Image (tube, rainbow, N blue to C red):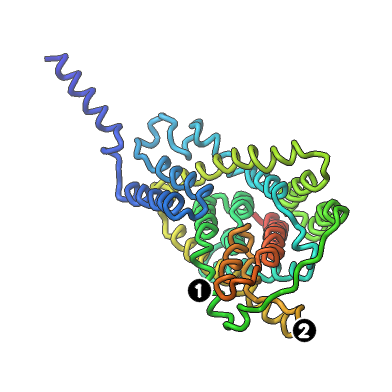
Amino acid sequence: MDVLEQLWSGFQTFVQYTGFANATLGHIAMIAAGSFFLYLGIKKEFEPLLLVPIGFGIIIGNIPFVEGAGLQLGIYEEGSVLSYLYYGVTKGIYPPLIFLGIGAMTDFSALLSNPKLMILGAAAQVGIFLTFIVALLLGFTEQQAAAIGIIGGADGPTAIFLSSKLAPELIGAIAIAAYSYMALVPVIQPPIIKLLTSDKERKIKMKPPRSVSKLEKIMFPIVGLLLTTFISPGGLPLLGMLFFGNLLKESGVTKRLADTAAKPLIDIVTILLGLTVGASTQATTFLTPESIGIFVLGAVSFMIATAGGVLFAKFMNLFLKGDNKLNPMIGAAGVSAVPDSARVVQHLGIKEDPSNYLLMHAMAPNVSGVIGSAVAAGIMLSLLLKVV
């Protein structure tokens, strides 16, 4: 009888530790959300390199278990493997490495051939600052509002970097929101672009970009680093790695290093970043009214940024004549979702006129948006970190 009682007691203990016994509606909801991310990434092919790791990470992070039992399973439990991997997110290690890879992959020729388009990348950052104000009005602290506002730049690494410094308690919600809207660029941007432009404006053909010399390409990352970091020293970890990666690419003498940064390194970091960001959505910690508010504000920020770029391009056209006029759709590419927002502009341009290729023109504000969001993050970090 004692043996049977021991077996029954052991079975009861086993059941208590299963996911079935510890599952909540929150866990089920988040697993469903993770599955939806996988659907978007695999079936719809919306940013699969981001949504597949994040979606699977959400499922991993919401497998129910007994918290506080010393099993060291959850991402928020000290000593767990996931918590060690998540260290790269919370301490802002992964974002600069991502920027290194982006720099090694990016060709800034489109921007160098028409530098005035950099203004559109700056104009799109209006979403960051307007959302910052709205978040303050809704009761978020200055640090939290700044971290939420940066979602409008559609730059996941920058959003993670800034929130890790200013609002680490919101990093999971901010990261998921930022990457979600990056992936949904093809869905969100077209209606806004069409609403703000006329048929005639969408058919504007821009003159071909000029050829850029090798010397210009080599000098750009050096001059760009000095200009941007002197203005915004707080963005140095991101901007320094971005321009360093670009110099590796353009110098022509460090091909192996550039290839490593642009391929294996960024792929490894993207896997770790996506998986741990997804796992940080553990239902018992993640599902709060604040998280829902962040998703709403993130959407508002992204839409304002898109509209700001388009409207400023229209404003610039008031002072431009002839073939110097801009197709205002390229202003939407000022958000730093590279290269998806530029591809959206290209697709819309071809839809209006099959002979109108806007990709190279759109890449100029697109890559300047990457720089602009990092500069904006650096400014906010410099202004607000001292009062944390």
Badge 1: few (under 14), some or many (20 or more) residues near its Cα, within 10 Å?
few
Sequence-wise, the earlier of marks 1 and 2 is 1
Q: Amino acid at mark 1?
A: Pro
Q: Is residue 361 above or below residue 78?
A: below
Left-right relation of 288 to 225: left
Q: Residue at x 67, y 80 (%)?
A: 314
Q: Is residue 184 above or below residue 42?
A: below
The residues bearing labels 1 and 2 have C-alpha atoms spaced at a distance of: 27 Å
Residue 321: which numbered mark, if any?
2
**Does residue 215 appear anywhere in the picture?**
yes
**Does residue 134 appear anywhere in the picture?**
no
Q: Residue at x 75, y 37 (%)?
A: 257
Q: Is residue 372 above or below residue 272?
A: below
Front in this rendered view, residue 376 or 225: 225
Q: Residue at x 44, y 31 (%)?
A: 72
Left-right relation of 21 to 362: left
Percent position of residue 252, x then y:
82, 43
Percent position of residue 312, x then y:
68, 77
Percent position of residue 65, x then y:
35, 36
Residue 231: which numbered mark, if any?
none
Q: Amino acid at mark 2?
A: Lys
Q: Residue at x 15, y 14 (%)?
A: 2
The extreme front residue here reads: 355
In the rendered image, the quadrant that contains the N terminus is top left
Which residue does the numbered mark 1 point to in the structure image?
A: 191
Percent position of residue 129, x then y:
63, 68
Front in this rendered view, residue 349 or 259: 349
